[in-house]
Image (tube, rainbow, N blue to C red):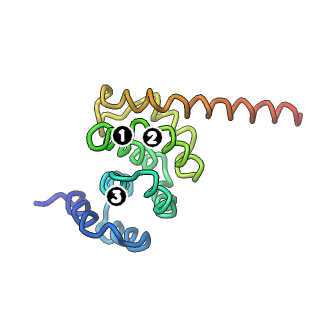
């Protein structure tokens, strides 16, 4: 018995150029849970140049990352890539999070939850720690944004 996610991963490796529409059809036709499909997609297609693929596949991700569960799967896959496949991603962590946030792919609450509660589904807490540490500048920026929005709201009252 072959794991459907393994088969999907192998298919992605063999066909990295598939259109976003075709990838959505594949996920649907294979009956894959979207959060699990997102994790496989990220681990296969984003491994080499995460930022570039994030730009070219943002419309696909926008359609796949609709729930908190799917957004956490995206971030968990980033954890796994950074810890086990491409350690250079740790240094790019703040840029990746900024890009995903700016593209409205991941909600602020989900980012904060990911920061504060590393999921053991993808990596150990020890493996997740370097990426969390590297992403601190992004979270500081996010908190400043919140403070500015709150002071703007206070000014309007």
How many numbered badges does the structure rendering display? 3
What residue is shown at x 48% (from left), y 45% (from top)? Answer: 96
Q: Which residue is label 1 attached to?
A: 88
What residue is shown at x 37% (from left), y 27% (from top)? Answer: 129
Left or right of 49 in this view: 139: right
| Quarter holding residue 37 | bottom left
Q: Tell us which disc is closer to us: 1 or 3.
A: 1
Q: Earlier in the sequence, mark 1 or mark 3?
A: 3
Q: Position of residue 115 (x, y in %)?
A: 46, 31
Secondary structure at numbered mark 2? helix
User: Do residues under tags 1 and 2 come within 8 Å of each other at their CB atoms?
Assistant: yes
Q: Which residue is label 3 attached to?
A: 45
Left or right of 102 in this view: 10: left
Q: Position of residue 152 (x, y in %)?
A: 81, 35
Q: Position of residue 53 (x, y in %)?
A: 43, 58
Give the camera-side residue of 56 and 125. Answer: 56
Q: Which residue is label 2 attached to?
A: 92
Give the camera-side residue of 100 and 53. Answer: 53
């Amino acid at each position: 018995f072959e794991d459907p996610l393994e088969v999907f991963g192998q298919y992605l490796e063999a066909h990295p150029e598939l259109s976003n529409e075709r990838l959505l059809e594949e996920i649907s036709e294979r009956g894959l849970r979207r959060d699990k499909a997102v994790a496989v997609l990220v681990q296969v297609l984003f491994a080499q140049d995460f930022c570039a693929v994030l730009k070219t596949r943002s419309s696909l991700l926008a359609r796949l990352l609709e729930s908190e569960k799917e957004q956490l799967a995206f971030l968990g896959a980033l954890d796994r890539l950074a810890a086990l496949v491409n350690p250079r991603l740790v240094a790019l962590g703040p840029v990746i999070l900024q890009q995903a946030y700016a593209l409205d792919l991941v909600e602020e609450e989900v980012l904060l939850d990911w920061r504060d509660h590393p999921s053991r589904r993808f990596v150990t807490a020890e493996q997740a720690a370097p990426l969390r540490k590297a992403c601190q500048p992004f979270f500081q920026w996010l908190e400043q944004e919140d403070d500015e929005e709150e002071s703007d709201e206070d000014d309007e009252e």
